Image (cartoon, rainbow, N blue to C red):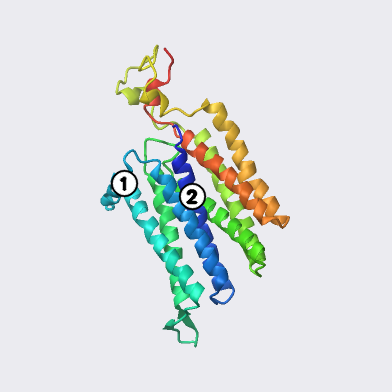
Amino acid sequence: MKPAFSVIFLTTLIGAAQGLLIALVAGQMYAGGESGGFYALGGAIALLLLCLGLVASVFHLANPQRGWRAATRWRTSWLSREVILIPVLCALTFLYAVVHAFGWAPVMVRLGNGAAIDLPLVLGLLVTLASLALFVCTGMIYACVRFIRQWASGWTVVNYLLMGLASGFTLAAAYAQVQGSLLSGFMSGAAVLLTALALAARAFQLWQNVTGAPASSLKSAIGVHHSQIRQITQGFMGSSFNTVEFVAPGGTETVKGLSVFFLAVGFVAPAALLLAGMPVLAFLCQYVGLLAERWVFFAAGSHVQNLYYQAKG
């Protein structure tokens, strides 16, 4: 299918923001849960990325003034759930950053062993839960489209989660290094591990897409089950929505070339840069690779209607 660049930037930006938030909370727990400007500024960066993702999503709407209606089908639509969760996560992120900025840390729960759970940690856990839920909603938007075999898999959700965590922890490693934080090593180690897991999972899904049997055939697409069916002309003799929007720009060769590119630039190179102690460069490299990965994800989605429109007249 023809990729929409607004959705490419939406998913990669909010994915990095979600991963960064989870990394900050993990660092907060790793370092003993103390609040401070480090977490406040990190939360502000995550909030900025979330807002940029929302701005990018507006360009995907035919009528932006009616965009609020996307949230009305939350009972059955993963898209509606995503639309609701993004502003909820933005609000929680804002509170998380403000609480850390002002050093508000009242005890919320006292545990039996003398330990306590304070407000920054409670907000951090809520931010983490909202981020994980948003990963699931975003992935399920595409995984539930059963007639596009390349998307209709649990691996779609797993890959959205792992790639978001990988980019978020890589960004956290870059941020920690710039700030001179002691968490830099922790963030870099976690980023390398998550990048390796994301590489393995995404490569496995690519292999599945190449070797898997098609979900539909020309017979099932047109509803005719004759033993011999031969297409001799295109379904529509001129350019139309059906012959443009459901075909990958550049064809299969472009998809294959960019698949190799994003595996190298989005995963292998960032892991090497992280190990070399260059997380800032690693994040910039990884984000470019993830933009290419998301383009391939959408472009490789083969719509069943292409069985009818595939031949050139």
Report the disc number at residue 160: 2
Report the residue at 37% width, 40% height from top: 145
> Which residue is located at x 58 percent, y 36 percent?
259
**Quick check: 270 left or right of 70?**
right
Label of residue 197 in the image:
none
Q: Amino acid at mark 1?
A: Gly
The quadrant in which the C terminus is found is top left
- Crowding at dot 2, Cα within 10 Å, few <14 / some 14-19 / many 20+, comes out as many
Residue 260, image x and y in percent? 61, 37
Q: Is residue 153 visible?
A: yes
Q: Vertically, is 151 above or below 214?
A: below
Front residue of 237/136: it is 237
Q: Secondary structure at mark 1?
A: helix
Amino acid at pointer 2 = Tyr
Residue marked by disc 1 = 67
Q: How many marks?
A: 2
Would residue 272 appear left or right of 93 to someone viewing this image?
A: right
What percent of the width, then of the height, locates residue 82?
37, 52
